[in-house]
Amino acid sequence: MSTYREIIGKKIKKVSSDPSSGTAGEMWYNSTTGTLRGPAILSAFSSGSPTVNAVSWMGSCGTKSAALIFSGTLNPYPTFTNVCEEYDGTGWASATNYPLSKIGTVGCGTQTAALGFGGGPYVVTTNEYDGSSWTGGGDMATPSRDRAPAGTQTAALGMTAYQPGSQGVVASESYNGTAWTGITNAGTARYFGAGLGVQTAAIVAGGVNPPTTALNAVEEWNGSGWTTLTVLPGTRTKAQGAGTVTAGTVLGGVQPPFYPLYTASNTKIDYDGTSWAVSPATLSTVRKFFGGDGSSTTVYCAAGQNTNSAAAITNTEEFNSSIDAITAAAWSSGSNYPSIVYRAASFGTLTAGATTGGSVNSPGAQPSTDITGEYDGSSWTSGGALNLARRGLAAAGTQTAGLAFGGSPSPSDAAVTADSEEYNGSSWTEGENMNTARQMIGGDGPQTAALAAGGGTPPVSALTEEYDGTDWSAGGVLSTARRSGTLNGTSTAGLYSGGETSPSGQVTNCEEYGGTSWTAGGTLLAAKGAWASGGTQTATLAFGGRDTGLSAQAYEYDGTAWSTRPSMGTARSMVAGTGVTTSAFVCGGESPSMVNTVEEFTGETTSANIADFTTS
């Protein structure tokens, strides 16, 4: 009998505790637990950040770390759209719009070399994407939509299709990067099939045989002809295919009853070149008419529909099969703030933070408060009271060296203050007043290099002030006067994001400060105000607030552009909060009544999936 070292090339070591990571095939004996241990393959879906838009019936391509979705329909259905979004494995960001607003456009290729074609109302149009812009390609022979796509931008297949008039099915076509050529149609007439593979080795699985018969039939194209393969375990339509003809997968889609309910599925069905098997890993959200692509072991599924209605969703999921256990970025409940409060201000970090001021809930009024609460990531303790109770104030610094300034000392927003106070971790002391009184102000930075911008004086303000630990001095002026935006960074490297020109006048403006003047930054994904944030000029997490209503959305800025992050559990505005892009908290606000709930954000983490192995 061969030893483990002779077979694998690695020794089994005796250790008292598990290592923090491992490699495939590595094993060790844990003397503390008395078990043989090692990294085990874990196959599972995990949540990703939501798409910018709730969209379905779109084209898609790429991988789970470089994905692309485009065209389709928004809510309410059918609102045809030309939106295009890119995913980097962490968040979605808006990209150059697709040239057409169509339903049933499909895609193949990569995020930087993508191909989109067809769509309804029926067209022959093809478009190519280079990672920044779309250009027209060669037209298809027949107008159609909902083809089963496969291949790359320069070597693509559009297998089977839905064409105008009595749900007819047109012949498949092949693209060489310039022109489409008709190929022999598949043996089974269908549309809404799932496509996977490359131009010379592709599969079309499931679909609909006109007019409404759902299929489980599978056929393979070898570059010259079709071969009938083992059928799917059940009928499936409008699913997504990914991978190759020897390692492929069919995800989600519509399962019986197909018509008229269009019941969505959460299954992953894998193909090994011979037979199909339902994966034990399932999507957390059933979905149909969605976007997805990748390989059989690393795939993404984005947006689409997850009910029997036509309403689109924004949820994204990723599938991984590796020795790593992935804990997705997410918001979770924290310890409630001691008081129901809104228009408060926070400073510090998730594990050493503080919230101060705001309005508290009181019968017949919403008076300003002077309370300060300190947070250690688990619980709140009472801190020193502000010398001046106020709401709509800003804060900066750390839990032991904080700064609070501006605000409104009474329920009337017309009463504003320039008062500034410093915090030493236990009590507040008066500092020099700001030059201009205002509330709903943006502020951040260390206690000795703080920045204040915007706010309501009233009316709204564009003024900036810098604090050096002793004095406030005038700085550059924002290009757009506004209040209720978020400010991050320091007096020499600041970021002011969103805000409101009026209670219903949210903006998408984002401006960067270099110590003297403001310049335009990346445009927000949505107009936003009355929200909170944490981070720096080049790494900010912003969350909550209001746009067309209360918002639960979170976005991250990388110094150039904004992208989505997982949404909070509760939509709320006029919130307090602080932190960094990987750990933050949000506190209080309106939802729609005043609340004291706290949520904590934790970024995605990866760790080795260590498991016990039998010794018998």
Image (tube, grey):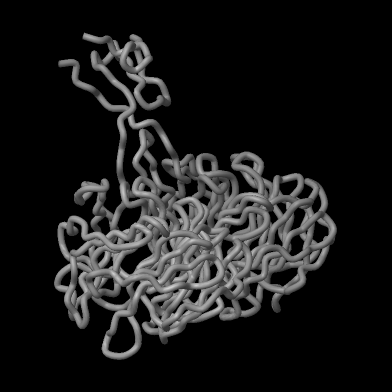
Viewer-proximal residue among 73 and 340: 73
Residue ranking furthest to the front? 224
Q: Position of residue 289 (x, y in %)?
A: 33, 70
Viewer-proximal residue among 605 and 433: 605
Q: Is residue 238 visible?
A: yes
Displayed quadrant of residue 320: top left
* Residue located 47% across and 75% down the image: 71
The relative height of residue 61 versus residue 450 in the rendered view (above or below) is below
Q: Quadrant of the C terminus?
A: top left
* Residue located 57% across and 66% down the image: 129
* Residue located 36% across and 37% down the image: 322
Q: Quadrant of the N terminus?
A: top left
* Residue located 44% across and 61% down the image: 50
Viewer-proximal residue among 139 and 522: 139
Residue ranking furthest to the bottom? 165
Q: Position of residue 436 (x, y in %)?
A: 78, 66
The relative height of residue 312 versus residue 465 in the rendered view (above or below) is below
Q: Is residue 368 visible?
A: no
Query: In the rendered picture of this protein, how many numbered marks are placed on residues?
Result: 0
Q: Is residue 463 left or right of residue 555?
A: right
Q: Is residue 109 left or right of residue 235?
A: right
Viewer-proximal residue among 379 and 41: 41
Q: Position of residue 210 (x, y in %)?
A: 22, 81
